[in-house]
Amino acid sequence: SYVKVCKKNDPDYDGCLANLVENLRPRLLKGIPKLNIPPLEPFTLPALDVTRDMEAIKVRAHITNIVAHGPGDFILNNLKTDVDNLVAEGTVTLPHLEVTAEYDVEGRALVAPFKGKGLFAGNFTNVKIDAKGMGKVVKKNGEDYMQITDLKAKIKVGDSKIKLDVKDDKQGALAQSAASFFNQNRKQLLDIIMPIVQDTAEEISIQLGNRILGSAPMSELLPA
């Protein structure tokens, strides 16, 4: 087969899976079309819409051409699975992450209003992701397939720096002021923004995970 999968009855299934991920790294960087796995390096998303109205932050954002450099250097810190109940949890660290995107956004964070269109560039270091996912079995064309039903992620960022370039000169001062405000208060603002980032990461991961799991039946991905 294209990928040598781990057998369900392997006494060290978690270790086998961790080794499989490491062995697949070169192919993960380029993507594995047969399994619907997109390239990790860089990781791209065509568009993302975010709307939130909370006490500390109000935001409406349309983000396009998202490109992330750094996911390919992920470190799998730990992995724990319960294959019978289709539960998995683990921790991944991204030592560095550089994200660029085009944004059209308006809102406020703490007391700072922001509005504008332009280019976003973010530099993040030591991004730690703790995730736990649950799945179920679904029937498709008479065969069993796995599907992710729930996924929770907790993300911590070591340090960050952002830069905003605006398309509209009239909004330029406001965007620079917002970027400067973010960089000066980044720890506090990351705490406020993180639930939005986590929600978005969970949604994307479930969609992506289910596309991958839908590419092959359970008998191939989780053989006895």
Image: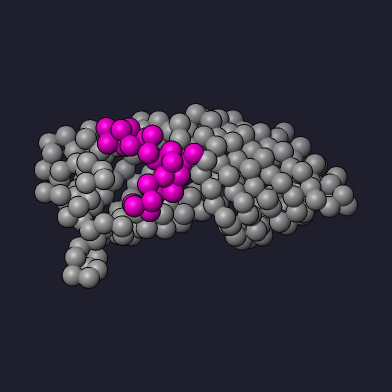
Determine which quarter of the picture holds residue 67: top right
Give the percent coordinates (x, y) of residue 61.
66, 57
Q: Main secondary structure of the magenta part?
A: helix
Is 102 placed left or right of 41 in the picture? right
Left or right for 57, reference 213: right
In this figure, what is the number of numbered marks?
A: 0
Residue 26 x, y percent position in the rendering: 38, 34
Colour basis: one colour
Q: Examine the rendering and report whether any part of residue 186 can be seen.
A: no
Most foreground residue, 166 or 193: 166
Looking at this view, name the residue that lies furthest to the right.
170
Left/right placement of residue 219 relative to residue 17 reads left
Magenta segment: 19-41
Q: Is residue 142 magenta?
A: no
Question: In the image shown, does 157 or 23 lie closer to the viewer?
Answer: 23
The part of the image, by quadrant, that contains residue 72 is top left
Residue under the point 21% across and 46% down: 1
- Residue in view at x 72 percent, y 33 percent: 184
Q: Can residue 159 be seen?
A: yes
Residue drawn at the location 46% of the way across and 56% of the way down? 203
| Residue 44 rendering spot, x and y as whole percentages | 53, 48
- Is residue 36 shown in magenta? yes
Residue at 22% x, 58% y is 217
